[in-house]
Image (cartoon, helix red, strand yellow):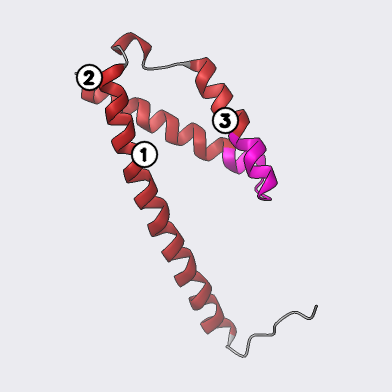
Amino acid sequence: MKKKISKLSPEKNLEKVRKNIDKLDLQILKILAKRRKEVLKVIKIKPKSKIVDQKRISKMIKMNIAKGKKLKLEGFIISNIWQTMIRSFIQLERKKYK
């Protein structure tokens, strides 16, 4: 299969790719907003003393790394993103419990 050669200038091609990335970023933000709503539901169920569940966090990260590898994503990307996301939502939970 031959690679498609773009007739766009490098600058226009870069602009096009960046616009695609911006669209993906918006999709990620919408998903994060949905995730936030679910986390707020968890707050109503889970006691304050159980905000951090290290076993669940480790399990989630390992599971998502495995799923990510099937999608050709590097493990360090998944690990870094999930750790940051989890820390941020823990921070939200703590703030909402006050």
Residue pointed to by mark 2: 97
Which label was assigned to residue 61? Answer: 3
Q: Amino acid at mark 2?
A: Tyr
Image position, residue 90 (x, y; %) = 36, 25
Q: Amino acid at mark 1?
A: Arg
**Does 64 sit left or right of 44 as displayed?**
right
Q: Residue at x 74, y 79 (%)?
A: 3
Whether residue 73 is situated above or below residue 55 in the rendered picture: below
Image position, residue 63 (x, y; %) = 61, 31
- Determine the main secondary structure of the stretch shown in magenta: helix
Camera-near label (1 vs 2) is 1
Residue pointed to by mark 1: 35
Whether residue 30 is situated above or below residue 52 in the rendered picture: below
> At numbered mark 2, what does the secondary structure look like: helix, strand or loop?
helix
Q: Which residues are magenta?
A: 64-78
The number of callouts visible is 3
Quarter assignment of residue 13: bottom right
Camera-near label (1 vs 3) is 1
